Amino acid sequence: MPLVEITDIHKSFGKVEVLKNVSLTVEKGEIVAVIGRSGSGKSTLLRCINGLERVQSGRIVVDGMEVTSPATNINALRERVGMVFQSYNLFPHLTVERNVTLALKKVRRMNSEAARDVARAMVAKVGLADKLGAYPDELSGGQQQRVAIARSLAMQPTMMLFDEITSALDPELVGEVLKVLEQLAREGMTMMLVTHEMNFAKNVADRVVFMHQGNVHEDGPARDTLIEPRTPELRSFLSAVLH
Amino acid sequence: MIRELGPNDIVYLLEAARWTVALAVIAMVAGGVLGLVVAVLRIVSFKPANWIAIGYINIVQGTPLLGQLFIFFFGLPLFGIQVGAWEAAALALSINASAFFGEIWRGSLQSVSPRQWEAGAALGLSYWQRLTSVILPQAVRISIAPTVGYLMQLVKDTSLTALIGFIELTRASQILSAATFKPLQVYGLAAIAYFVICFSLSRLSEQLEKRTHAAR
Amino acid sequence: MNYNFRFNALLPYTEEIIRGIGVTLQLTCLTMAIALVIGLFVALARMSGNRALRGVARVYVEGIRNTPLLVQLFIVFFGLPSVGIRLDAYLAAIIGLSINVGAYASEILRAGIQSIRPSQIEAGRALGMTAGQTFRSVVLFPAIKAIYPALASQFVLLLLATSVVSSLGVGELFHQAVFIDSRTYRSFEAYTLITVTYLVLTLAVRALFSLVYWLVFVRRPRA
Ligand SMILES: Nc1ncnc2c1ncn2[C@@H]1O[C@H](COP(=O)(O)OP(=O)(O)O)[C@@H](O)[C@H]1O
Ligand SMILES: [Mg+2]
């Protein structure tokens, strides 16, 4: 059974149709790069998967939980699906350590000591062990984004969603964040990531999903799809991002 | 009976200043509690509650405090509630404060980025956990400066209660000025007393703000 | 409750109320105009390179903002005569109010001036605009747009604050309540009517400011 199973979902904001009959599956351990022009519905797709957006019709099942059913405890689902945003969204009033421990203590009901141990391990994993006591406004963008990843990982999610997490970073800081993603890939984490880093998609992702005007326009193995696009839309998109 | 300004007169002014502070503290506490109610009514997703809060805020902020003071001073006895200048002053200032606090706190709450709500949601925090652990601490930080700013206004506003005869710093200065015929010195002293209170408040606000971290 | 509210007892005083509204609006507009001039000079002084000038301006602004208007008015009207400066109530009111609002206006104007970025001026020049055009469309217009809401609320606050000068005996709107009260002994009705009149005035003034904002900044945006 696939980890994520999306069947015929439809999503509109008012009169604007943002996702039109999107169907997609993601297997456990798979790394799926979602690409496409701005406004094609990539973020909306990711946000539907952890229930930040509600769909009008269709079904989304993640790890056996039906996201689209009103009976599902959406907060319990979100514990299992980590999400990192373009704008980091760290909690500015909390230190790095407390950013990571907050959900462990509140949601997982861990005691302070256990939560702190997890936070130490996760923050060390993204290479920021010396920044545990720092506040977000004392960190660079790349460091903040790595903390945001650590914060998500601390919840031991079954899969991770990444929405253009390097787009807001200065070019010289992109590498340090991508390195963390590569490490996660080696560890076998299931990931869906919206990205404009085509080389990264080519080398790290298993699959590429190309979104175009609210539809999955092309879906295939990363290397083949990016080197030999089948549709003119993907071809023109790729030539636009690569030049 | 004209006489010189003596140490006793300064003590008299300082004693009256205690009433200025007492009035401001009462309005701060009562107005703060009522202001929370106003802020909540203003943001809950229930239109009639929003309208009531907006109407209340517009009426209070659209009329002079002086008018509110006189209405309570003369109006409450007509409803069988005997009040002196002190009660009328405390009531009018509390109501005034509640409208301002309500607006300030609503604004602070809504100025926390919606992305903070989302970040909390994405971690599996419940609505209540997001509100209390993520949003409120940031809203409180944002509200410090405008809240203390309004407290300074409140201290200055208490001077208007002199005009319904409540003896606080300004009314005491009027009395002393009439007795000593030294209006410039007496009102100057009163101004210094107000300055000390208000300036300390603004310093306090700076200190509080320095100790907290906010979004950049 | 066995009190009979008799608002119609106030009817004979319509003329006084209308006169009061006139004086209040006149006081408000005149004060605002003077305060803007004071505010501009003080704002420039606070940003000048001269330390002494900056210090004086800061003392003025802090002194005014940390003391009540009523005490400031008492100092001007009752205090100054003891050093030989005798002003009639209306003049004292204008001076006291202007000095008060000037301090607040200077803060608003300072924020407006600081909102102008030199890069915008360069961009305007680079587009081939003359210095005058650049100043108008790149400097003045956006700066005024930025401070317009703050100035509008300052105006409303001032309109309400003028009620305080009734204590000097200036015949503005609030003073008419005192007058009507003394004639009719209908205190509650008199103060309620006048307070509601202020509400109508502030609502009208706010609507007018919104209309002007829409006409000038929304309908045909130039910047
Ligand atoms: N909350 C929203 N309300 C209204 N429209 C939205 C909202 N979020 C996204 N949209 C619209 O949906 C479309 C797809 O947006 P998005 O999923 O963010 O695209 P992408 O991430 O591919 O750039 C865009 O046209 C965008 O304007
Ligand atoms: Mg997006």
Image (cartoon, rainbow, N blue to C red):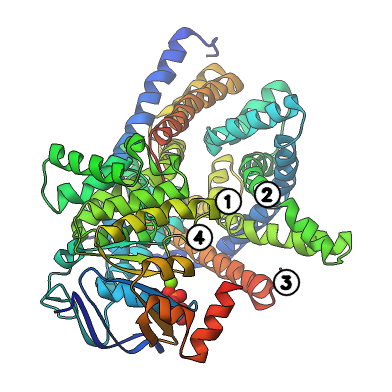
The residue lying at 38 percent from left, 40 percent from top is: A135
Whichever of labels 4 and 3 marks the residue nearer the N terminus, that label is 4
> Which residue is rendered at x = 34% and y = 45% of the image?
B140
Looking at the image, how many numbered discs can be counted on the residues? 4
Q: Quadrant of ligand 2?
A: bottom left
Q: Which quadrant: the N terminus of chain A?
A: bottom left
Question: Reading the chain from its start, which is encountered first: label 1 or label 4?
Answer: 1
The CB of the residue at mark 4 lies under 8 Å from ligand 1: no
The kind of residue on which mark 2 rests is Thr
Tell whether B216 sits left or right of C92. left
Task: Return the residue nearer the eye: B78 or B215.
Answer: B215
Residue at image mark 1: C158
- Chain of residue at mark 4: C
Q: Which residue is the site of mark 2?
A: C31
Tell me the element at label 1.
Answer: helix
- Which label sits in the foreground, 1 or 4? 1
